[in-house]
Amino acid sequence: MTMDRIVLVGGLWTDASVWDGVVAELGGDAVAVSLPAEAGTTLDDQVAAVVAAVDAVPGRAVVVGHSAACTLAWLAAGARPDKIGRVVLIGGWPTTEGERYAAFFPVEDGFMAFPGWAPFDGPDSADLDERARERFAAGAVPVPEGVATAVVRWTDARRLEEDVPVVLICPEFTPEQARAWIAAGDLPVLGRVKHLTLADIDSGHWPMLTRPAELAALLRDA
């Protein structure tokens, strides 16, 4: 039996290497996407990179998005719904229609740089030691303005809400919190998903760095 290949998409300021520990656990069943991040890169360019990775998979793909890239994974999956066996979201969810992709911090000279660790104090970064924080900050990839400030539209992604199973992996928040947010209407895309499963992982916001084996096991289950 052929297993669905796992396509991994990292969140803001990361490159494909953020998944190294997870890929080592999953072996040939997973591939990490290298997102373009040069000056002038747009959100459409990054979606195209994920779609290309999906197209390269023989058979179906499980698309995994982390943090802000949950939106990116959802956009790419919407472009290839017949190729998608499942969507997995880690520590985030698709952006609400009409909102900007990730305009969270100031943009200077065409890029949104990593803002340092102060905005992520608390549960987000509690399991990252000082060395891990230094490595992350040193390797952080600035986000192009055309990605961070792009307005998100869901024209191609509506089919996913009815047809595609979705798994939300909850790191720094709990499944119970996520269910409450969905019930309150705070996560409108997830509120429309027909086949939604929530999974817990005891980690901060970057479980691929601090809990790669446990995260890989959850992805295998998905």
Image (cartoon, grey):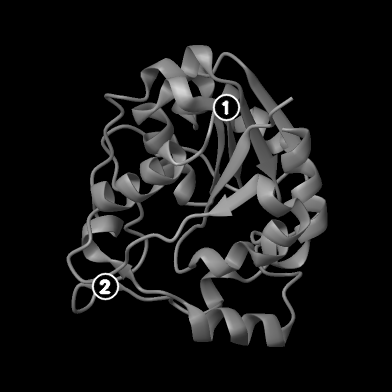
Camera-side mark, 2 or 1: 2
Give x and y (percent) for residue 131: 70, 87
Question: Badge 1 is on which residue?
Answer: 182
The picture places residue 185, in percent across and down from the top left corner, at: 50, 25
Residue 220 can be seen, yes or no: yes
Q: How many marks?
A: 2
Residue 50 percent location from the top left of the image: 40, 46
Q: At x 39% / y 27%, what residue is drawn?
A: 80
Residue 98 shown left or right of residue 81 in the figure: left
Please name the residue that numbered disc 2 is placed on: 111
Q: CA distance from mark 2 to mark 1?
A: 32 Å
Q: Nearest the camera: 28 or 74?
A: 28
Considering only vertical position in the picture, is 141 above or below 1? below
Q: Residues within 10 Å of mark 1 (few under 14, many from 20)?
A: some
SS label for mark 1: helix
Q: Which mark is residue 198?
A: none
Q: Nearer the viewer, residue 10 or 112?
A: 10
- Is residue 207 at all visible to an observer of this figure? no
The residue under the point 26% across, 70% down is: 38
Q: Position of residue 91 (x, y in %)?
A: 61, 48
When the figure is inspected, residue 78 is found, relative to residue 103, above or below; the finding is: above
**Amino acid at the residue labelled 2:** Phe
Residue at disc 2, secondary structure: strand
Q: In the rendered view, would you say 166 is above or below 10? A: above
Q: Amino acid at mark 1?
A: Ile
In the foreground, 18 or 30: 30
Q: Quadrant of the N terminus?
A: top right
- Answer with mark 2 or mark 1, whichever residue precedes in sequence: 2
